[in-house]
Image (cartoon, grey):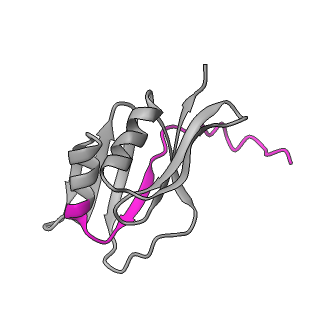
Amino acid sequence: MTMPNQGGIRFGRIAATLPVSDMTRALDFYVGVLGFTKAFENGDPAGFVILKQGEAELHLTLQPGHRAAPFNVAHLMVGDVDALHEICRRHGLRIVKGLRDKDFGLRAFVFEDPDGNRIDVGQPLG
């Protein structure tokens, strides 16, 4: 299917928004464990937070009744997938798909964050 040029629209950055049932717990994980920094916070208590780490940007939205989807909700490319896998394992996170080299050129795994959001993590092979 060919899409017409919609007036020269160019797409820029896109960031995943993850629903979390407990913002404090989510921030403890994403900031305290993964090393993201808060770039923006809205509400008191915070109901929406923008996090940044390197080139990655992640948005968290407070959804007290959140129930995690049974599929991956975000894909994260990293420089050391083995190190992130070890961090996830060490912190007791559920590894949904184990770390392995994929035939499509990535070393990858899938984990669940503290709210059960499935994050697919990859690093290019070679």
60, 88: nearer the viewer: 88
Location of residue 23 in the rendering, given as x and y in whole percent from the top left corner: 24, 64
Quadrant of the rendered structure where residue 8 is?
A: top right
Q: Quadrant of the C terminus?
A: top right
Q: Residue furthest left?
A: 44
Q: Is residue 41 magenta?
A: no
Residue 80: quadrant of the picture:
top left
Above or below, 57 against 24 in this view is above
Residue at (74, 40) in percent of width and height? 5
Q: Total number of numbered labels?
A: 0
Instruction: Give the extent of the magenta segment.
Output: 1-25
* Secondary structure mainly formed by the magenta segment: loop
Q: Is residue 39 visible?
A: no
Asked if the stretch drawn in magenta spans residue 14, the answer is yes
Residue farthest to the right, as pictured: 1
Q: Residue at x 27, y 59 (%)?
A: 26
The reply, left or right, for residue 101 in relation to residue 50 is right
Q: Residue at x 14, y 68 (%)?
A: 45
Of residue 83 and residue 74, the one placed in the foreground of this image is 83
Q: Is residue 107 visible?
A: yes
